[in-house]
């Protein structure tokens, strides 16, 4: 499937883009001709490797280190992109954090960290880029949620709560900024072959597969193709949508 | 005997706001809730309200010019309340009103007074006095005026939410363009104008001072054409601008009628004053007993109000006036210095402790009434409401001018500490910077 042609030259920011789905989104956007920037929080080696892998394909990406829940970092990133590019057209709130813990082991600090990264980070980055998007009356925001906000599944409660918050943010923001031609959508992946899917014990994978009509885990390109569609002009009439890509769990 | 319901304040705080919403004004209650305004004002300390979470609010509305629960006014009222003195005098020859009028005569030169309970009550009294005196039909106000909300005052009002719904208005009333001596001259030349009503500095109109040239023209032309000059000093009086007990005392001709209100009762008791000259009163109402009280109100000159006013007037001395001039000038300069580089800042105007922070309109759709879901307010400036909201969260209660939402009205209590004014300037600078950042 060809990437949407209208992404050529657009200005894209992906949070948490140094690995996993975030990196694949950067790659897909770069291949589609978008200018790409990503944020990362912890591992310089991951960021370096991400840059190298993108450069290998001729994609020159800007990157910024910092926490998505740090409003100062958010301001700096968006200000830098406005200075470098003149604005941001596409925002992918991908940065996320999880801990696979039962509620008995979730401390208050764990709750705060997961909520700050997964929900507050999306709020801060959305708010920061919207100022320019609203002025230009154009823009796309894509929130990367999780199927746990769409299905009744066993998931860490703070993680599920944060992803449900992201769902609410998506719906309310879509309503608020639709008048400016800006779309806000939620992509809710199920278990993938990479990321969390690669870390879970086998019995949890088996449980997932039993619930999944398609009887398999997802693959990154299956996510990125839908993400690119939601970021493209083809999805101009799609907003407030929650698309679970989980094999039908 | 059945006991009256307790006025325990804790209980009142719990239920009173909900009762206000249900039984007084649901829209205002909703606005305050939506804006996240602090509601639980638990007590007063050193002249300022303290919230239930311990935060102090510096109230810059102006009505509490002497600080909330001013201890000296409080004490004077308590002394009266603990006595067995009458609360009302059946003959209406009220010794408290007499004493207050005599003190005001000594301090202002106006030897006749009437004491209603509200500022707009004083305006009504002045309008009726001017009609009774001159038998002329017309009354002039100035565009941007705000003199109160009763029907006569409303007729003087600038068009907008305070006026439009209530027509038809008092006939013969019209507004002159702001600060336009030529228009004034033309209007007065007809010889049918009973009174010209003006605020030396328009409050709700945007803290707009009338120019010296216009004031001079008003003084001269009103006398030449036999029109009464009425100075509404409900905002500027009682030392607010630092010029004197009356701001207009410095004019080349003293107005025929001056109006006081707001903090005249020390912020504790509602009382206002219409001051004029005995000769004018006698010409209007001195013909016989029947007309002597043809304008009156039941609680005019009530004991409680007069006692509060008598004690309040003692507080307005030369030291207070000098302090208001000095602090006002410091505040103005500090605001200009700290805000001058902010793109939303225009200028500071006003005098003494009555200042207006004039702001540029916000030019971003996401900070607009349309975006907030109030398209009927589209076109009105949002900058002052937004800054006031932010300042309230920082502990400073300021508010947008009623007719011009591009201006923040700043009227601190007279006793405000310089350190508090410095904190206020810091808060203004930081919050306006954030607003500017949000609109880039």
Image: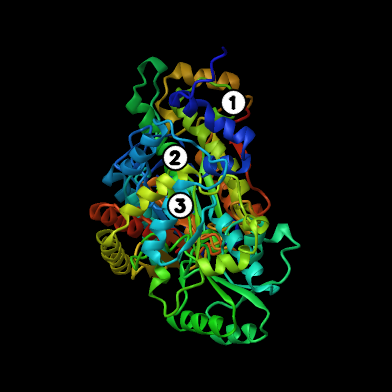
**Separation of marks 3 and 2 at Cα, in angstroms:** 41 Å
Q: Chain of mark 1?
A: A
- Report x, y in % for residue A187: 56, 40
What kind of element bears circle 3? helix
- Give the residue at x 33% y 60%: B429
For mark 2, what is the residue?
A: B38
Which class describes the residues within 10 Å of circle 1: few (<14), some (14-19), or many (20+)? Answer: few
Label 3 with label 1: CB-CB less than 8 Å:
no
Q: Nearer the viewer, residue B398 or A114?
A: B398
- Report x, y in % for residue A70: 34, 45
What kind of element bears circle 1? loop
- Report x, y in % for residue B84: 43, 30
Q: Nearer the viewer, residue B233 or A163?
A: B233
Q: Closer to the camera: disc 3 or disc 2?
A: 3
Q: Which mark is residue A90?
A: none
Q: Name, please, the residue furthest toward the front.
A: B288
- Report x, y in % for residue B86: 48, 36
Q: Name, please, the residue furthest toward the right.
A: B168
Instruction: State which quarter of the image contains the C terminus of chain B.
Output: bottom left
Q: Chain of mark 3?
A: B
For mark 1, what is the residue?
A: A151
Residue B129, picture quadrant: bottom right
- The answer to whether dots 3 and 2 both sit on one chain is yes
Q: Is residue B198 above or below residue A191?
A: below
Left or right side of A57 for A90:
right
Residue B318, picture quadrant: bottom left
Q: Nearer the viewer, residue B317 or B203?
A: B317
Left or right side of B353 for B135:
right
Precedes in sequence: disc 3 or disc 2: 2
For mark 3, what is the residue?
A: B98
């Amino acid at each position: 499937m060809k990437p949407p042609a209208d992404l050529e030259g657009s200005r894209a920011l992906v949070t948490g883009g140094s690995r996993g789905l975030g990196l694949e989104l950067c790659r897909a956007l770069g291949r589609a001709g978008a200018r790409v920037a990503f944020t990362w929080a912890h591992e310089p080696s991951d960021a370096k490797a991400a840059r190298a892998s993108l450069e290998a394909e001729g994609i020159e990406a800007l990157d910024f280190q910092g926490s998505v829940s740090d409003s100062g970092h958010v301001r700096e990133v968006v200000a830098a992109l406005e200075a470098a590019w003149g604005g941001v057209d596409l925002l992918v709130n991908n940065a996320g954090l999880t801990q696979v813990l039962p509620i008995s082991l979730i401390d208050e600090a764990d709750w705060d960290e997961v909520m700050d990264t997964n929900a507050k980070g999306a709020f801060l980055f959305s708010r920061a880029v919207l100022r320019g998007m609203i002025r230009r009356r154009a823009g796309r925001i894509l929130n990367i949620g999780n199927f746990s906000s769409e299905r009744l599944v066993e998931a860490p409660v703070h993680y599920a709560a944060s992803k449900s918050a992201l769902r609410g943010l998506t719906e309310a923001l879509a309503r608020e900024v639709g008048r400016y031609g800006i779309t806000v959508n939620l992509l809710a992946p199920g278990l993938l072959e990479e990321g969390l899917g690669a870390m879970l014990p086998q019995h949890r994978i088996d449980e997932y597969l039993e619930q999944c009509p398609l009887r398999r885990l997802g693959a990154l390109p299956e996510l990125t193709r839908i993400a690119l569609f939601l970021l493209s002009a083809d999805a101009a009439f799609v907003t407030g949508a929650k698309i679970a890509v989980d094999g039908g769990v | 005997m059945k006991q009256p319901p307790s006025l325990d304040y804790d209980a009142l705080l719990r239920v009173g706001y909900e009762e206000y919403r249900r039984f007084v004004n649901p829209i205002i209650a909703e606005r305050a809730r939506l804006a996240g305004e602090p509601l639980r004002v638990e007590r007063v300390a050193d002249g300022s309200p303290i919230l239930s979470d311990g935060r102090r609010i510096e109230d810059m509305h102006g009505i509490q010019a002497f600080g909330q629960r001013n201890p000296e006014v409080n004490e004077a009222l308590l002394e009266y309340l603990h006595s067995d003195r009458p609360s009302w005098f059946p003959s209406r020859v009220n010794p408290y009103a007499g004493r207050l009028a005599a003190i005001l005569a000594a301090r202002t030169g106006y030897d006749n007074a009437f004491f209603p309970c509200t500022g707009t009550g004083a305006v009504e009294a002045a309008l009726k006095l001017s009609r009774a005196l001159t038998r002329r039909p017309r009354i002039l106000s100035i565009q941007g005026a705000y003199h109160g909300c009763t029907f006569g005052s409303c007729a003087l009002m600038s068009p907008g939410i305070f006026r439009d719904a209530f027509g038809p208005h008092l006939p013969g009333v019209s507004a002159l363009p702001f600060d336009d001596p030529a228009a004034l001259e033309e209007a007065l030349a007809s010889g049918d104008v009973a009174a010209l009503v003006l605020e030396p500095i328009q409050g709700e109109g945007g803290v707009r001072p009338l120019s010296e040239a216009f004031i001079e023209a008003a003084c001269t032309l009103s006398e030449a054409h036999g029109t009464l000059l009425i100075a509404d000093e409900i905002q500027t009086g009682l030392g607010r601008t630092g010029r004197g007990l009356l701001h207009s005392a410095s004019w080349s001709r003293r107005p025929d009628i001056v109006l006081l209100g707001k903090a005249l009762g020390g912020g504790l008791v509602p009382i206002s004053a219409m001051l004029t000259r005995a000769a004018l009163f006698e010409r209007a109402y001195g013909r016989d007993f029947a007309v002597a009280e043809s304008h009156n109100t039941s609680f005019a000159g009530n004991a409680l109000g007069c006692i509060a006013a008598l004690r309040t007037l003692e507080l307005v001395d030369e030291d207070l006036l000098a302090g208001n001039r000095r602090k006002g000038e410091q505040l103005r300069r500090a605001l200009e210095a700290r805000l001058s580089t902010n793109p939303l800042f225009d200028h500071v105007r006003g005098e003494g402790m009555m200042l207006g922070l004039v702001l540029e309109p916000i030019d971003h759709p996401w900070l607009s009434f349309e975006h907030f879901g109030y398209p009927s307010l589209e076109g009105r400036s949002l900058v002052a409401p937004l800054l006031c909201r932010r300042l309230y969260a920082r502990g400073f209660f300021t508010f947008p001018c009623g007719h011009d939402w591009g201006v923040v009205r700043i009227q601190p209590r007279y006793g405000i500490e310089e350190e508090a004014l410095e904190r206020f300037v810091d808060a203004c600078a930081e919050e306006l910077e954030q607003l500017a950042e949000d609109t880039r």
